[in-house]
Image (tube, rainbow, N blue to C red):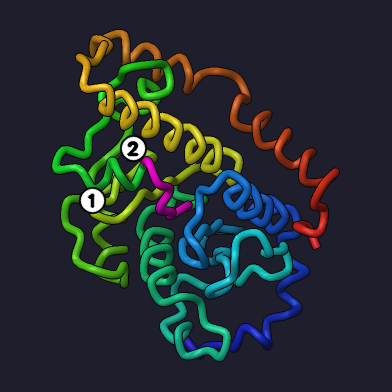
Amino acid sequence: MKAVSISEQRDDSLLYQKERAALAASFRWAARLNLHEGVANHFSLAVGDGTRFLLNPNQRHFSRIRASDLLLLDVNDTGVLEQDDAPDPTAWGLHGSVHRHCPRARCIMHAHPIYSTVLASLSDSTMPPIDQNTATFFNRYVVDNSYGGLAFSEEGERCAELLSGTRCNVMIMGNHGIMIIGKDVADAFNRLFYFERSAETYIKALWTQKPLRVLSDELAERTAQSLEDYPGQGDRHFNELLAILDAEESDYAD
């Protein structure tokens, strides 16, 4: 497929306004909550039939991203990295591959928040259910133990394979960070927020060097299922975040 430069796609910035605004808001809140890392890390959102997705522009600080800044990319565009305003190659390799091979991953958030990354740096990166938040993720994450450097297409293909055919919506990327997937921005951001809080609770519990109060598998699973079935929690959380931005930082939607 012939690559079309992003500068020639500016009319596309008028497409998917609601989706663009939601994804832009997630970047602003990731910056506010220190879930980002400099001008690295990347979030994406599949639109339409899933063959195209929105992605943050290369090396743009999350606190400055607006809806109209987001790139609209085609998962099958083999020339995307040849464009003048090409996306970060690691972002393309990771997000393009996962969107291509794992259709249920409508929204993908890859980040290096500190406690999740500490967890990913341990020789055992599993997280036991020691409270309600950590129980949320019981049997609902996978661990990638095959870090091989920067995340180009090979890592994206591997991540897509690990997530496919599972109910897992979180990947702990060993020696790297985390990847969260969701059905939309609200779902993914809510999961990112609570996974980082869960990792913080677990890491700080380890600091005490005291025995952990680990929930039984049965209770952890029941808790996780109850939280999954809790009506509209992710949407309500994100709607509140949107309301705050609308009052304090409304240019995210521009």
Q: What's the residue at 28%, 51% (across, down)?
A: 173
Left or right position of 239 against 59: right
Left or right of 211 in this view: 13: right
Q: Is residue 156 above or below residue 115?
A: below
Task: List x then y, in percent, for residue 46.
Answer: 55, 57
Residue 192: image x %, image y %? 48, 40
| 163 vs 188, nearest the viewer | 188
Mark 1 burial class by Cα count in 10 Å: few <14, some 14-19, many 20+: many
Does label 1 or label 2 sit earlier along the sequence?
2
Q: Position of residue 22 (x, y in %)?
A: 68, 50
Q: Nearer the viewer, residue 127 or 239?
A: 127
Please report the residue visible at 74 percent of the width from the left and 42 percent of the height from the top: 242
**Residues shaded magenta:** 109-115
Q: Nearer the viewer, residue 106 or 189?
A: 189
Q: Residue at x 50, y 77 (%)?
A: 87
What secondary structure is marked by label 1?
Answer: loop
* Alpha carbons under labels 1 and 2: distance apart: 16 Å
Disc 1 designates what residue?
A: 174
The verdict on residue 111 being magenta is: yes
What's the amino acid at mark 1?
Gly
Mark whose residue sits in front, 1 or 2: 1
* Res 28 label: none
- Asked if residue 83 is positioned above or below residue 34 in the image, the reply reads below
> In the orientation shown, which residue stands out farthest toward the left?
123
Type of amino acid under label 2: Cys
Q: Locate residue 105, reporting x and y percent.
A: 44, 49
Q: Farthest residue to the front: give it.
A: 208
Q: Where does label 2 land, which residue?
A: 168
Residue lying at 65% horizontally and 31% vertically, measured from the top left? 237
Which quarter of the figure is the C terminus placed in? bottom right
Q: Is residue 142 magenta?
A: no
Q: Is residue 8 above or below residue 25?
A: below
